[in-house]
Amino acid sequence: MVPGSPWRFLALAASLVALLAVPASARAQTPLPTSGCDVGPATNFLAADATQAGVVSLVFFGARGAVVEFFECVDGRLVALGRLAGDPDAGTLMQDATTWDCARPTRSFVARATLPDGRRVAGAYSVRTGSCASRFEVRVPQRVARGKVGRVQIVDSWGVGDIKPVLCVSPPRGDRICSTVGFRKAVSTRTRRFRATTTGRWRVELRVGSHRIRRTATVGGGKAPKAPPLVLTTGDSTMQGVDSFLADELGNAATVRSDIRVGTGISKSDWLAIARAQVRRHKQKVTVMSVGVNEGFAMTTPAGAKLECCDGAWLTEYVRRLGAMIDSYRRGGDGRVIWLTLPLPRGGPLMPIVSAVNAAIVRAGRGRRGVAVLRMDQLFSPDGFTEVIRYRGRYVRVRAADGIHLSVSGTAIAARVIAAELRKR
């Protein structure tokens, strides 16, 4: 998951202090949801934090290290959110327990646990989240040259996706064209394009249920805006999907161009020559690279020594090749490089190779100006291979069936992390 603060309950501090001051006899009488949601009398405090857009986090106090079961009450029944044990001396925190829902802004939660002494404890809490009225941002260019393509960027500010708004584009004289914009889970940005064939004001409208978000773009009548910087996405098959989602994430802020070389590897292909040719052709401002699942081949050093994977000498040569590529992409210090490490594979002979590649990437990027190494291994496999991670309140399947590549949702998450790194500067 994208790193975040492990404690986001500052907004609840005052209310928690007030709650803790209530006598135990009064707290025990606090009712819990009924009609299938009743888990017994409320003996302990459960708090919900909905201050971070898109997600609700829960904290249960007084579990003394026991396993706490968290639920949401939906239509009179308990829906399990998860179970975990926390610090015996602190609250049990379930970060990003669930996501906001346009149809259910008022949410009710319960939690229960069995203490080490056998006593059963429970708590309840309700919170209201945001509505879809302010969920989406619609970004359109202020001016588009006639005959050119205008890009409409639709941003889910909640960052959870799994929704299908409708986008309508109306030319000054002509019929309105509407289409559904599908957001998969964890997809936060989509882009749609229109050909600016007619001068005048073009109307853009996003429909989310009963809500409408309207924008306009002017075609003709002035100088076209300056071309945005070019971002090159390149590498092997691990970049597939990430490139298109990154284009959606960046919208009009950048032009994303993809040059993927499936089946290549730095230990078996002349990637330095490829890098130099890419720079001559594209003159990109930023290079985003993901490569390394086709490695493990013997390499020959400039001095003629042949090295087998994956000992220290092989790793040193791999780092040297990575460094030469990075320097080429940097174009004398004028360009930026974002290099992705690889999520760990399911297992087998590829595991030590990917581990060696990741170590080399970290070493090669260390201390180089304009270079950022994004740890996809820590994001998608912090404790080893896993198919599903919890991301912004939902369990998301992030790995493809082959146990190597990312799924569609996984590539969307990776693109979002890359876009965030680009926006830092």
Image (cartoon, helix red, strand yellow):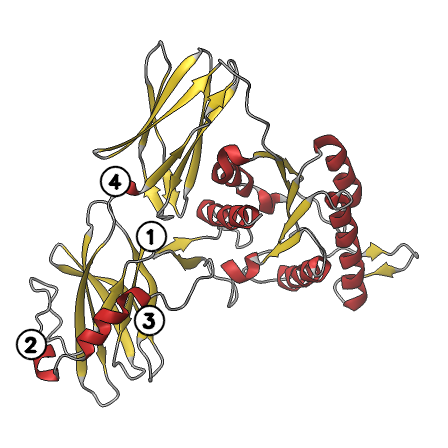
* Amino acid type indicated by mark 1: Ala
Q: CA distance from mark 2 to mark 4?
A: 37 Å
Task: Determine the image quadrant of residue 272.
Answer: top right
Could you say whether the residue bearing mark 1 is in a helix, strand or loop?
A: loop
Q: CA distance from mark 2 to mark 3?
A: 24 Å
Residue 329's place in the image compared with 28, above or below, is above
Near-viewer residue (265 or 287): 287
Lower position in the chain sequence, tag 4 or tag 3? 3
Q: CA distance from mark 4 to mark 3?
A: 29 Å
Could you say whether the residue bearing mark 4 is in a helix, strand or loop?
A: helix
Categorize mark 3 by other alpha carbons within 10 Å: few (<14), some (14-19), many (20+): many
Q: Position of residue 259 (x, y in %)?
A: 65, 36
Could you say whether the residue bearing mark 2 is in a helix, strand or loop?
A: loop
Outermost residue toward the bottom in this view: 117
* Amino acid type indicated by mark 2: Gln
Q: Is residue 9 visible?
A: no
Q: Position of residue 198 (x, y in %)?
A: 44, 10
* Amino acid type indicated by mark 3: Leu
Q: Which residue is mark 3?
A: 93
Q: Which residue is mark 4?
A: 133
* Amino acid type indicated by mark 4: Ala
Marks 2,1: beta carbons within 8 A: no
Q: Which residue is mark 1?
A: 53
Lower position in the chain sequence, tag 2 or tag 3? 2
Lower position in the chain sequence, tag 2 or tag 4? 2
Residue 195's place in the image compared with 355, above or below, is above
Instruction: Name the disc covering residue 29, or none.
Output: 2
Q: CA distance from mark 1 to mark 3?
A: 18 Å
Q: CA distance from mark 2 to mark 1?
A: 32 Å
Mark 1 or 3, closer to the camera: 1
Instruction: Name the disc covering residue 132, or none.
Output: none
